[in-house]
Amino acid sequence: MTTMKQIICFCCFALVMAAGCKKAPYLTYSDIARIQMADTITQSATFVFEPENIVQDTAYIQVNTIGGIAPYDRQVKFVQIIDYSYTYKRDSVTNQIIDSVATEVPFRAIPGVHYVNFDDKNMQSLMVVKANQATASIPVILLRDTSLATNTYRLHIQLAENSEFGLGEQIAREKMLTFSDHLERFDSWRVDSYLAPAFSWFGKYSVGKHQFMIDVLKQNIDDGWFKAASSNGSLRQYVTVLKQALIDFNGNPDNIASGKAPIRETASPSSSAITFP
């Protein structure tokens, strides 16, 4: 028969277990106003489709605030951070790391050369969350330096604390911009997998394929073009046209004799010939 002492002990144990299983409260950041980026996906841009007289472009970084709105404009602070690659030396016996060397990743964007410095006084009025707003698109002004024609430059942006905002989630404080003045992957074709919608239609990305598409379709093949074609249902027709154009070009005796055919992924004669799925 269960004794009163046993019942009391069981009830105490149940209360302890219930307290231990209680969920921890969500972190609400109710202490101060904070800010974070809406996404951390690498963003790409290129001047290649722009007329020569266009010497700057603007990329926008979406930011979200936490902790309520304010009846006045609030300044947002960006800083550029440097990226490093690391090589490690290991002990030949234990395989433990015993030394490392940090090397700066090349083609870091230079303020005043590749983009307008975030501290420039003309930028200050643009880098704000407007009054009574909880989100903003902060402009980053890219400059068309001649070095962009041969290399892709990297601008790694990080949010920084200031008098208006603390920082939000650790994983939502940085974003990479890459930009150039030559053909680049665009967002809808950012990777060679089905995570990128353009891959489903055109397959593996290459500069050779990208240029061929421009030559055949006589259009600027960029993210805006892809999204418009996807929206109006013309992608299937474009793929059909491109496939036939590739067959015709590669089968042309003159192109074969001159070495232009088959069209390859790069200028190297040893690179793979382009294909469409």
Image (cartoon, rainbow, N blue to C red):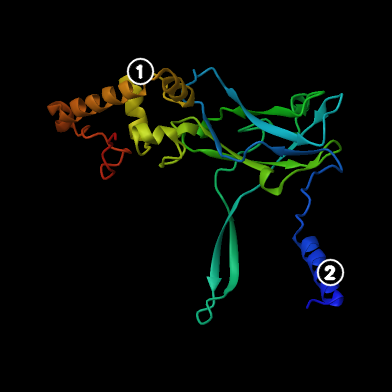
What is the residue that sits farthest to the front in this orientation? 1
Q: Earlier in the sequence, mark 1 or mark 2?
A: 2
Could one spot residue 186 in this view of the protein? no
**In this view of the protein, which residue sits in the foreground, 103 or 262?**
262
Q: Is residue 271 above or below residue 15?
A: above
Q: Secondary structure at mark 1?
A: loop
Name which residue lies at 31% across and 26% down.
239
Splitting the image into 4 quarters, where does residue 70 fall? top right
Q: Is residue 66 above or below residue 14?
A: above
**In this view of the protein, which residue sits in the foreground, 2 or 206?**
2
Name which residue lies at 61% across and 50% down.
83
The residue wearing badge 2 is 12
- The kind of residue tagged 2 is Cys
Could one spot residue 101 in this view of the protein? yes
Is residue 164 left or right of 118 when viewed as pictured? Answer: right
The residue wearing badge 1 is 218
- The kind of residue tagged 1 is Lys
Splitting the image into 4 quarters, where does residue 215 fall? top left
Q: Is residue 173 above or below residue 213?
A: below
| C-alpha separation, residue under disc 1 versus residue under disc 2 | 78 Å
Residue 91, image x and y in percent? 54, 78
Badge 1 density bin: few <14, some 14–19, many ≥20, Cα 10 Å: few
